[in-house]
Amino acid sequence: FPLFFRVSKDGRVERFHNYVYAHPSDNCNTGVRSKDVNNNSARLYLPKITGKKQKFPLLMYIHGGGFSIESTFSSGHDKYLQSIVTKANVVALSVNYRLAPEHLLPTCYDDSWSVIRWTSLHVEPWLKDHVDFSRVFLASESAGANIVHDMVVRASASEKPLGESFKIAGITLIHPFFGNYEVDKYCSFVFPECEGLDVPRLNPAAHLRLLSSLICRKVIVFTAEKDFLRERSLTYYDALKKSGWNGEVEIMETQGEDHVFHLLEPNCEKAGLLMKRLVEFFNEKI
């Protein structure tokens, strides 16, 4: 799979994308502090604190990368989270998960859910002291956005709720990776337990009942004109509107750009506009 990895007959995995590790840090310019938590399953970012009892919305971010590349600890994602925390004035928890093909799906979903469950326990001091758990947001791009959607579906149907104080207010899906009814050899390889092309995790638009029961109040979907996944994002948006879900869904398209352009060129004007809408979304009253 040229975009992601090669698996040799002896089982050796060769990735075609290697990230640069970024250490957690205290940023003296922005006041943002970060540390790795829960046995290195996540990186926690704290914005500049101006008051002892100051509470912030919580952004839980689950990185993309085809379920098989990238990391919470990569320099690119670390810089992007630092930027979001600074501009949106939120606490952010960037979720890490084990990668395919060494760890086939649904491992990434289960790992992410485990971090969300841990977060809901309020055991980490930064979270306990500085998070307004009634304003939790989930966000990501590409395959990470797929995981984000599944986390909300799981939270909506969970027999063990995350707690009365833990409320998912909204989700942000940036150029989400969703399947359709066409054969996808890559998905079949990394998700061998998948029973078909219309399973909820891969093709949520085919499951209106699940969409109608989402517990969050707001969803925003970002698309890009040249993104090969654009039509699937539009299908998801249309299905959510038709499902009977009683929340608010919005779509924002960036003209002339391709898949995850905002991570490849985070300083370009159009990436700035996308960031501006993210900041507004995380600070809107819900």
Image (cartoon, rainbow, N blue to C red):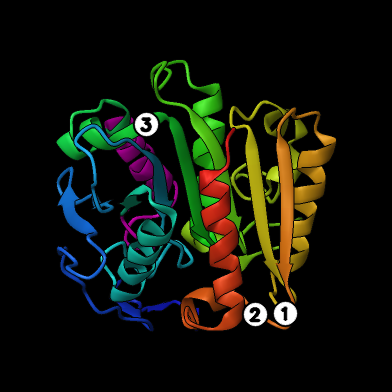
Q: For mark 2, give the secondary structure.
A: loop
Q: Alpha carbon of mark 2 to alpha carbon of mark 3: how far? A: 35 Å
Which portion, as a residue range, is magenta? Answer: 97-118
Q: Which residue is mark 2?
A: 258
What residue appears at the point 41 percent right and 25 percent down from the top-left corner? 166
Q: Which residue is mark 3?
A: 132
Whether tag 2 and tag 3 are in contact, CB under 8 A, the answer is no
In this orientation, does residue 3 appear?
no
Q: For mark 3, give the secondary structure.
A: strand
Residue closer to the observer: 225 or 56: 56
Is residue 143 shown left or right of residue 237?
A: left
What residue appears at the point 69 percent right and 65 percent down from the top-left corner? 223
Label located before the other in sequence (2 or 3): 3
Q: Amino acid at mark 3?
A: Asp
Residue closer to the observer: 107 or 170: 170
Quadrant of the rendered structure where residue 23 is? bottom left
Could you say where residue 238 lies in the image, as x and y percent from the top left? 82, 48
Image vertical order of residue 79 relative to residue 245, above or below: below
Whether tag 1 and tag 2 are in contact, CB under 8 A, the answer is yes
The mark tally for this picture is 3
Q: Which residue is mark 1?
A: 226
Disc 1 crowd rating (10 Å Cα; few below 14, some 14-19, many 20+) is few
Quadrant of the rendered structure where residue 127 is? top left
Image vertical order of residue 113 relative to residue 104, above or below: above
Residue closer to the observer: 3 or 151: 151
